[in-house]
Amino acid sequence: MSTFTDDLKVYREGVLAQGFWALQIYRFGHLRYRFNSKLIRIPLGVIHLILSKLSELFFGIYIGVSAKIGKALIIEHFGCIIVHGDSVIGDHCVIRQGVTIGNKNMDDPHGAPILGNNVNVGAGAKIIGRVRIGNNVDIGANAVVIKDVPDNVVVGGVPAQILKQKDM
């Protein structure tokens, strides 16, 4: 229950935020991994599948159930957001509309990004492939990240490059 309240605290719109509910649907689906019994896992999986599809339809947000998401993720604006099921997102990250966090090609279907803590992803950014994004990184709007990004930098462009080092 603390995850629910922790998530709720970071949303300015509170329970009215579509991103908050998309995140809670993901967390509900991820909950089934705590149970070994198929009698519990299967019904939870079916309910999650229905809720996940509703999230896609009404919010435009898809979060793969097997993704690993830390605490206090903020989905700032809803719409056209895809998070691959093999992705990892650290604590206190922000993603905005039009963001894709996913695999690069069908030759590596599980090759998804790993985002560190305090990553701020601008609108329309694409983070694709087996890349690692460091802690305290800002990714500019419409950037296409296809290689690893170190800690404490701002990146932007197509393909994304380091624009500046952040003072920490």
Image (cartoon, rainbow, N blue to C red):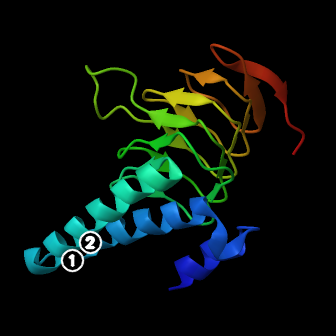
Q: Secondary structure at mark 2?
A: helix
**In terms of depth relative to the viewer, which is nearer, 116 or 16?**
16
Residue at position x 20%, y 66% in the image: 46
Q: Amino acid at mark 1?
A: Phe
Q: Spatial distance from mark 1 to mark 2, Cα to Cα?
A: 6 Å
Work out which residue is located at the far left of the displayed protein and give it. 38
Q: Is residue 153 above or below residue 168?
A: above
Q: Amino acid at mark 2?
A: Arg
Left or right: 141 with respect to 1?
A: right
Residue 19 is tagged as none
Residue at position x 73%, y 45% in the image: 136
Residue bearing the label numbered 1: 35
Left or right: 124 with respect to 105?
A: right
- The 10 Å Cα crowd at callout 1, few under 14, some 14 to 19, many 20 or more, is few
Left or right: 114 with respect to 92?
A: left
> Is the residue under label 2 in contact with that under label 1 (CB below 8 Å)?
yes
Residue at position x 63%, y 39% in the image: 134
User: Percent from the top left, x then y, of residue 45?
Assistant: 22, 66
User: Percent from the top left, x then y, of residue 28?
Assistant: 38, 71
Residue 38 position by quadrant = bottom left
User: Percent from the top left, x then y, of residue 34?
Assistant: 27, 75
In the rendered image, the quadrant that contains the C terminus is top right
Q: Is residue 113 above or below residue 71?
A: above
Residue 102 position by quadrant = top left
Left or right: 106 with respect to 86?
A: left
User: Percent from the top left, x then y, of residue 127?
Assistant: 54, 30
Q: Is residue 78 above or below residue 45?
A: above
**In terms of depth relative to the viewer, which is nearer, 5 or 47?**
47
**In terms of depth relative to the viewer, which is nearer, 103 or 56?**
56
Work out which residue is located at the far top of the displayed protein and give it. 158
Residue bearing the label numbered 2: 32
